[in-house]
DNA sequence: CTTGCCTCTGACGTCAACGTGAGGTTTTAG
DNA sequence: CTAAAACCTCACGTTGACGTCAGAGGCAAG
């Protein structure tokens, strides 16, 4: 498949896909004329990358960790990195839960009929 | 209290506090000589701002919502906005949970003794 | 063969939340 | 009184993940 097809099936922009390749996260075969060609496995690869980006990992970090996924092996350093990121995500989830509760409080507080406006 | 004190007690940089004021999120009285002066309520205000930033809200969004908090009243538009942000956070939490599980899978997968290396 | 969409490689633009340094005033400790 | 520390206002720098435009070539349809 060509880059436009991959973009469509992953809902990721063409620019982003080229960026991923630039960062070393995604590889592609090239046609005679230089166009990028991808196998179907690329779809899953892009999804994984998106998921890790979504979790707040940087290109650099993802680049370090992808080889582990591919080789199914982690060095002590990369394992440490993985655990650190997981813990960071856990902490961030906790933070988001607190913030959501806070927003809910605000919603409740501001949605309750205002006493000053109540009929006596 | 002066800006340095507020920075210390909230663990937010002086620059950030000035930035919050620039964005209209934080107000300050001024001394004769022009230095910012804050009441103790400013600490909670900054904490709230930090929490909302941490939840991924932008200055602009926070600016829209703070008056609701202060007045304890929300217009239909702002209520809609609050609910939308809450739902976005909920979705993001779900995304993070998925990503964390994915990371855990990777950790497990790469930490298990490699079969190819096992003694027969 | 040409029209129109896809792709290519640069390379500059963007946006948000600050960081950082300049150059100058104010407050505080000794 | 004086030196250090804290404060002030500009105003440019930073970072990451792309967006966007330019200029040029590639590819299936009619």
Image (tube, coloured by chain):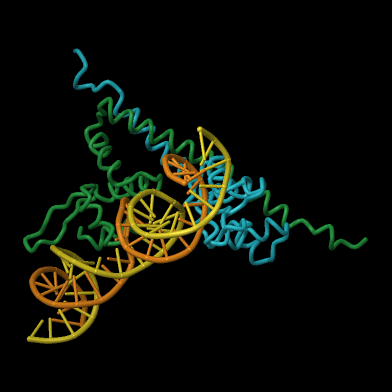
Chain colours: A cyan, B green, C orange, D yellow
Q: Which quadrant does the N terminus of chain B fall into?
A: bottom left
Who's the residue at 25% across and 31% down the image? Answer: B72
Specify the quadrant of the image occupied by residue A73.
bottom right
Between residues A46 and B60, which one lies in front from this camera angle? A46
Q: Please, which residue is most extreme toward the top here? A: A120
Q: Which quadrant does the C terminus of chain B fall into?
A: bottom right
B48 vs B81: above or below: below
Q: Horizontally, is B110 left or right of B94 in the view?
A: right
Residue A13 % position (x, y): 48, 46
Residue B9 % position (x, y): 31, 58
Who's the residue at 66% across and 49% down the image? Answer: A39
Residue B43 % position (x, y): 28, 51
Between residues A83 and B9, which one lies in front from this camera angle? A83
Who's the residue at 66% across and 61% down the image? Answer: A67
A61 vs C30: above or below: above
All told, the count of numbered labels is 0
Specify the quadrant of the image occupied by residue A117.
top left
Q: Horizontally, is B94 left or right of B26 in the view?
A: right
């Amino acid at each position: 498949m060509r880059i436009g097809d991959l973009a469509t099936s992953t809902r990721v922009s063409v620019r982003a896909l080229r960026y991923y390749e630039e960062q070393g996260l995604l590889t592609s075969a090239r046609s005679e004329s230089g166009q990028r060609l991808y196998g179907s496995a690329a779809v899953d690869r892009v999804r994984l990358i998106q998921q890790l980006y979504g979790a707040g990992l940087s290109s650099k970090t993802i680049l370090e960790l992808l080889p582990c996924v591919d080789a199914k092996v982690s060095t002590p350093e990369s394992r440490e990195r993985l655990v650190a990121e997981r813990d960071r995500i856990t902490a961030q989830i906790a933070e988001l839960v607190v913030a959501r509760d806070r927003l809910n409080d605000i919603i409740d507080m501001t949605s309750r009929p205002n006493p000053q406006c109540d009929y006596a």
